[in-house]
Amino acid sequence: MNPAFAFAAASALLFGGGDFMGGIAARRAAATQVTAFSCLAAIAVLALGMPFVPGAPTGADIAWGAATGVCSAAGATLMYRALALGPMSLASPVLCLIGLCVPAIFGFASGERPSPLAWAGVGLAACAIPLLAMTGEGPGHYSRAHVRRTLIASILAGLVIGWFLVAVSRIGPGAGLGPLVLARVVAIVILAAGYLVRGRSPMPAAAARAPALAAGALDSAANVAYLLAVHMAPLVLVSAMVSLAPAVTVLVARFALGERWTVPQGAGLVMALVAGVCISLG
């Protein structure tokens, strides 16, 4: 078995777990504070991994690393906000699907021509989003207005995360983890500066710190696993496995938070996962 697929599967699991922990932290503190604080654990994980993934980044790699940091700061904040609003079983699949569509469009504009299978995935994604929004009302459910807010936040998060994936994909295979470290530093500087300029502390509430650090560590490890996998196997195959990350978040939310699924939402989740695979394989 190609070890790339083991790395890709690990990336999906880590991304899903990180999304869940980030959403929990953002329910206890501002999403921007959670994102900034999570970067501390993310940088620590990357520092530990640098000796095992050596490299010499070029100027272009450094530039893409900085762009990755800008997208990371905005994308993670929006993502944690969407997951904090909940339900996670709506937010995670939607933001992941939108995030997958952006690299597909970027590739098309760059001269790539997606197959009919990829376009079928885009169509399935469009159909899945309204199904995922049918979470129901009453005990154990969310109001329609709340679902709309979550849907908007998730779409915005997905758009930024999509550009994050584009930026990471432009980092060369010989760059090592240096550009990813730079990305985290850029993200924490942007977020912390915003608070300091306003005379406020970027430190989240005590109750949010542990899950925020867990989110940062898991997300950073997922990025490393993804980077290793994509340098060892075709991007489309690696992306197909990583696109299953929302299933992890949804399942954890179901058993840890007791989020209930409606029949349409269950069908939408299945359709969303199929769409992610079609887009990636296309």
Image (tube, rainbow, N blue to C red):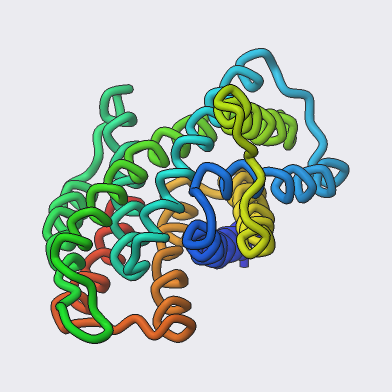
Furthest residue toward top: 59
Residue 228 seen in this snapshot: no
Vertical placement of residue 192 versus 47, above or below: above
Vertical placement of residue 87 versus 137, above or below: above
Residue 243 seen in this snapshot: yes
Residue at 62% from the left image edge and 41% from the top image edge? 36
Q: Quadrant of residue 91?
A: bottom left
Residue 106, image x, y percentages? 32, 29
Q: Is residue 43 left or right of residue 65?
A: right
Residue at 27% from the left image edge and 29% from the top image edge? 108
Furthest residue toward right: 51
Residue 263, image x, y percentages? 16, 83
Vertical placement of residue 98 versus 112, above or below: below
Residue at 23% from the left image edge and 53% from the top image edge? 149
Residue 257, image x, y percentages? 44, 81
Query: In the image shown, does 39 or 34 lie closer to the viewer?
Result: 34
Query: In the image shown, does 238 or 12 lie closer to the viewer?
Result: 12
Q: Quadrant of residue 102?
A: top left
Residue 234, image x, y percentages? 49, 47
Q: How many marks?
A: 0
Furthest residue toward front: 199
Q: Quadrant of residue 247?
A: bottom left
Residue at 64% from the left image edge and 34% from the top image edge? 188
Q: Is residue 157 left or right of residue 109?
A: right
Q: In this view, does 116 lie to the left or right of 3?
A: left
| Image quarter (top left, top right, bottom left or bottom right) of the N terminus | bottom right
Query: In the image shown, does 261 or 23 lie closer to the viewer?
Result: 23
